[in-house]
Image (tube, rainbow, N blue to C red):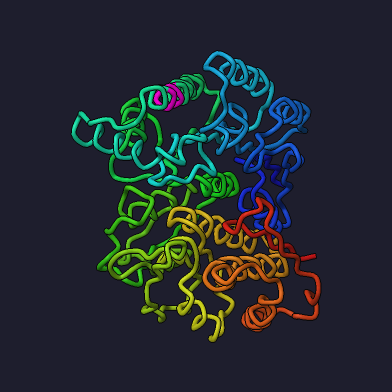
Amino acid sequence: MKKIALIPIDNRPICYPLVEQICAIHKDIELFLPPRGLLGGLIEGSDIVAILGWLEGLPQVDYLVLSLDTIAYGGLVNSRRCPEGYDEILARVKRLEEILARLSAKVYAFSSIMRISNNNINEEEKEYWSQWGEKIFEYSHNLHKSGGAANTVPDEILRDYLATRKRNFEINKYYLGLARRGVFDTLVYSKDDTGEFGLNVEEAEILASLGATVKTGADEIPLTLLARAIVGDEKISAVPIFLHPESAGKISKYEDIPLNECVKSQLSLAGIEVCDMDDNGGADLNFIVNNFAHEQGDLVLGEANPSTATVFDKSRPYFIADVNNANGADFGFVEKFLGTAAGENFYGYCGYNTSANSIGCAVCIATIKFLALRAGMYDDEAFKKLMLVRFLDDWAYQAKIRKKGFQKNEFAPFEQKICEFLEFDCGKIANNVQYALPWRRSFEIEIGIE
């Protein structure tokens, strides 16, 4: 039995129940999560003292996947908003260090580089972002790109923003010292909602120059590290197959590196050997990437790309990251895919939010299914329930239902189609699928199956 503990970024469906759903595929994994009520949401931060207490009382585990933002600030969103100073936050981190010194688990830790969103939406930022967000983004972009920038932001707001950035950056540099002392076996910095230029990109470059591992993305990093923990010393390989190979070098929305580099980066972080197309006969898994032919669409902005690529090899184990559009599935692609038999070689699908999010999620699902089958510990019903949730979320909801408003009765025909595709007895889930909006906004839906 492999015992793995995970402290999530926050309490969102993609951060908490998804982890449980994925691990349920492998009968030889015992997962430990702090009580969900201790984790922060959109408005409130995590109960850091209680989470540290939970960690201190944790039974012996093999691996700990650890969100440092949760311990330092109370969560990913709170890392941009919490008012505490460097010394107070450092005291929490040192308390964490004391607890980790008494654990014998391998620690896979991750921390975010504070994002700079290019909009005037303050839902996840400080209050002043509603008026000055785009101007702060412009200042940051130009300062990094050109070494200087005109400022149209009020001085007191810019000072507060830069002070928050400096505080988080100094904490991130402190983590490097912990990694060098062996407190963390793996330390990853994530670039959340990034672009080609900006103070966040500059910080990432500095951290990388100091020897840090920096990855594009955020929400998927714990999933990729979870896959890394489960892979352990085992050997597993995958070959990325882009359905539009001519565009694999393009950059996705909200990201700063080419898509093909993002794919290889996530696979490598998960401990998976990346094979070239010429070597795909020897790879364990085919990683199908439904990428964009020209530029990535964005369902939130109402800019869905047309569906074009539909045919790929199903004769070998395969899994899919659907990134033709950001913020949801390629509706036509999935509809056609669900109209054919998945076959026994189907190892997973994901198509939510950013490209990195979809890629890391898909990698984690496929890795755990592959290793569960290899160990003779595979739970097929758990896999089918997970896929039902992913298709209902990424495809039915994000690509279709969300734009019309959240109505539970809209899901019934999608449930039927997905169950038929998965060869899953719809009677098992009749009236047993629950839908909710836990953050009281349309962006995240939580889908549960009893």
Q: Quick check: 239 left or right of 316?
A: left
Q: In this view, which residue lies farthest toward the left? A: 146
**How far across and how far down the image is residue 125, in percent?**
51, 38
Q: Can residue 44 be seen in this snapshot?
A: yes
Closer to us: 425 or 72: 72
Closer to us: 18 or 345: 18
Magenta: main secondary structure: helix
Q: Quick check: 238 left or right of 437?
A: left
Q: Can residue 348 be seen in this snapshot?
A: no
Identified at 79% across, 77% down, the residue is: 430
**How far across and how far down the image is residue 327, in percent?**
48, 61
Closer to us: 247 or 88: 88
Image quadrant holding the C terminus, namely bottom right
**How far across and how far down the image is residue 247, in percent?**
27, 65
* For residue 39, above or below residue 417: above
- Occupied quadrant, residue 118: top left
Q: Which residues are magenta?
A: 160-166
* For residue 86, above or below residue 11: above
